[in-house]
Amino acid sequence: MPWEIDPHHTLVEFSVTHLTINIVKGRFKDVHGTIHLDTQHPENSWVKARIQAASIDTGVTQRDAHLRSADFFEVVKYPTITFESTSVRPIGPKSSIVTGNLTLHGITGTIELQTEFTGSVRDPLTESIRIGLTARGILDRRAFQMRFNQLVGDGLPLVGNRVHIELRIEALHV
């Protein structure tokens, strides 16, 4: 069954270490995509999604501007982040490993996301059926040519290389 990602009820969040002692969290506010969910044969399911890189938001205007620059996302040159699944491997009754191609900063790489189906419900306002999914993964930003590596103080990296990704997706039946 085809489902359209609801951008108003979907969170695409990330976190990365800051000075090795804490994390900075952020999100992308402009996300769209399609999910084909085959509940009888989950391995036939797939997802295609796109995110506008300029929609990045960490809550700090100066940091967001730096993240949009050539040091990181280079949003003028690479405005769109895309994900297209290549395989879905069920690992439980409601969970799967989704492998796919992530294109970020002009580089396409493979990423694995651990996903969980969180349920379906009829929306009482619209009468449409909605589904919920979560997904988690980790990527190394250097694999996507995001090599900003400022060392501060005693040689501590300002920003970590491992980026934790967490998605909370709500989609509508189309």
Image (cartoon, rainbow, N blue to C red):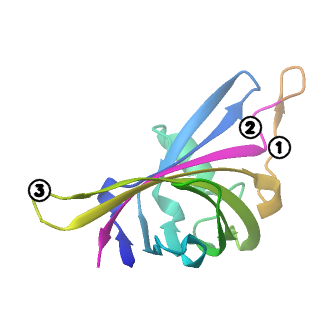
Residue pointed to by mark 1? 149
Mark 3 and mark 2 lie on one chain; the one further toward the N terminus is 3
Q: Amino acid at mark 1?
A: Asn
Question: Between marks 1 and 2, how big is the CA–CA gap?
Answer: 7 Å
Q: Quadrant of residue 142?
A: bottom right
Marks 1 and 2 close (CB-CB < 8 Å): yes
Residue pointed to by mark 3? 124
Q: Position of residue 108 (x, y in %)?
A: 74, 73
SS majority, magenta: strand
- Whether 161 is among the magenta residues is yes
Q: Position of residue 12 (x, y in %)?
A: 49, 53
Residue at screen point 71% across, 74% down: 106
Q: Horizontally, is 24 left or right of 12 in the view?
A: right
Q: Closer to the camera, 172 or 18? A: 172
Q: Nearer the viewer, mark 3 or mark 2?
A: 3
Residue pointed to by mark 2? 159
Q: Label 2 neighbourhood size at 10 Å, few (<14), some (14-19), many (20+)? A: some
Q: Horizontally, is 130 left or right of 138 in the view?
A: left
Mark 1 and mark 2 lie on one chain; the one further toward the N terminus is 1
- Whether 118 is among the magenta residues is no
Q: Horizontally, is 141 left or right of 167 in the view?
A: right
Q: Nearer the viewer, mark 3 or mark 1?
A: 3
Q: Closer to the camera, 41 or 145? A: 41
Q: Amino acid at mark 2?
A: Val
Q: Position of residue 159 (x, y in %)?
A: 74, 37
Is residue 158 at least partly visible in the picture?
Answer: yes
Q: Secondary structure at mark 3?
A: loop
Q: Which residues are magenta?
A: 157-174
Residue at screen point 77% across, 63% down: 144
156 up-or-down from 171: above or below = above
